[in-house]
Image (tube, coloured by chain):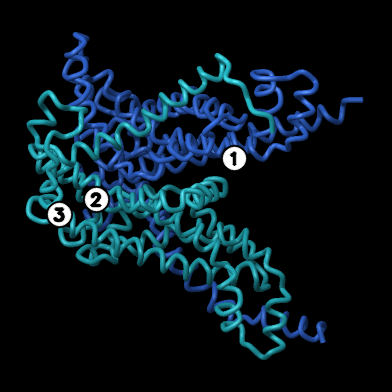
Chain colours: A cyan, B blue
Amino acid sequence: MKKKKWTVGKILEHVFLILWLLLCLFPLYWMFTMSLKDTNEIFGGNVVGLPTQWLWENYANAWGSGGRVSSYLLNSIIDTFATLILTSFFGFMASYGLLRMRWKGQKAVFTYLLMGMMIPMHAALYPLTETLLSLTKTNWALIIPYTAFNIPITVLILSGFITNIPYEMEEAACIDGSGIYRTAFTIILPMMVPALITAAIFVFLQVWNELLLATLFTTDKVRTLTVGIQQMSGQYQTDYGSMGAGLVIATLPTLILYMCMSGQVQKSLIAGAVKG
Amino acid sequence: MAMMGGLLLKRVLSSKWSIAVFVLPTVLFFTYIVVIPIFKTLVYSLLNEIPAKVGSESHFAGLEHYIAMLTPARRNSFPGAVGNSLLYAAVSVFLQLPFSLFIALLLANGIRGESAYRNIYFVPVVISSVVVSLLWQRIYKGLLPQVFEQFGWAMPQNGFLGNKTTKIWFSFLPSLWQYVGYHMLLMYGALKSISPDVLEAATVDGASGARLAFHIQIPMIKPMLKVCLSFSLIGSFKLFDTPWILLERSNKDLPALSMYVEMFSNHKYSYASAQAIFIVLECLVFTVLLNILFREQKDRAQGKELNEP
């Protein structure tokens, strides 16, 4: 490829792109600096500058004494990972049965699952509160609906992959006398790992950032980060530094995931959108 | 040997019992948690009030709630809420998507730092919309007032989120900002997958810049544009997190907010169920409309090809 020359047009393009880049990053910069300032500074003359004193105690505050971010974080981690394990398991089982095995009506059942994806969660809210009422003191109140609502997208992402695996794999295992469950879990499942990761990242971001169900189905002890920090912002109206620290703690896991594997995250979200 | 294996495999793969083990748990679970509640909501929306709350007073009310919620009246905020969601959809379709497309074109046509720009533009997408909303809340209440004061500009009356006419616009801004990166990435990916031969041929024919974009690149990524359109339309009708955090709690300015408030604050369960069903129908109708729109264009394009000598 030939090197492009710097023309006025190219420079203008870069100016525009850099302006939008700053707009994308500014709220993050602001969040990090806010988390290290005291309220006076946030409201005083130093709104956008770096903190004059780096107040790490804001984090201690949010983590334990003032806020309860440690507990919110733990609940978010439990709910998210339990959901990921369950969607991967159910998703794999269903896509194997629906797309590898041969039976009448498999297409109809596949379509039935996928229809669920077109319907927003809003439509199930009230009946779900009835179903899950007795569980709201436990993490299951969120894990169960999160799993159910994310099964269709998982099956869909897996479906594109599982149909491309040649049948010779199973044939060989079959001749060796391996049963279907062993074949599915020891031969096909390992080959599905990339697709399972793609689906898992998509589901992770959905679940980690979910608010609507989390506001309804969590009581004090099992609050997740999204509801927790949103309530913090009301309760500790005067302590914006700690609120900033809470926001940073809530954001770091997704941010770290993105920084470590930005390509994979982008791929997952493309797969989820294009198929969804 | 291979044939025997094939036959054996065929038998194994169509064993009814194994199929049930693989598929049934998921299907039953999904039905119980997703499908049945949706049908329950539909039934509730057709009753005067749900049985669990009023006992034997519960009776079939037909479309009463639907008529009530769609009849324009001074105290009925739902038509206004639907209007606002359409407004958001319009802003998203006519400003956010073209803006994302413009960035995607700049990046896809090759520019220094292409992937760095792309990776950073995508950062807001992975952040929780709750965090984004709370940050923008601080921007509206803490940062912008100071900036406006510094420059001596007039603030909107009662602040950015207190002013009756403008607050809805300011509550839209954070999620519009957040998802530019998503649309940009989808379009960028599609643009990148156009065969270089096509672009080269067009360039040889003298097309460049805007002409190349409008005559070659944009028509070629139509399927992806459809994905973006349906994503942004359905997102508009479901919009909840950002306005819920930015506006005051009893706010009913968008369909999802209205449903939530009627259901969990005002305890009008059946009425709120009708609103929930309305949101679902709104999403379905627009999905079907998009499909028709894009199918017609496809047919026309194919027809044109056929008619050409």
Q: Amino acid at mark 3?
A: Trp
Mark 3 on the same chain as mark 2: yes
Task: Tell me the residue at 59%/72% (across/down).
Answer: A97
- Left or right: residue A62 compared with residue A276: left
Contact (Cβ within 8 Å) of mark 3 with mark 2: yes
Mark 1: which amino acid?
A: Gly
Per the model, the C-alpha gap separating discs 3 and 1 is 40 Å
Image location (x, y in percent) of residue A196: 51, 63
| Dot 2 crowding, Cα within 10 Å, few <14, some 14–19, many 20+ | many
Q: Are marks 3 and 1 on the same chain?
A: no
| Residue kind at label 2, given as amino acid type | Ile
Location of residue B7 in the rendering, given as x and y in whole percent from the top left corner: 77, 83
Label 1, secondary structure: give it.
Answer: helix
Residue on which disc 2 sits = A249
Chain for mark 1? B
Residue contact at pointers 2 and 1, CB within 8 angstroms: no
Q: CA distance from mark 3 to mark 2?
A: 9 Å
What residue would you read off at disc 1? B189
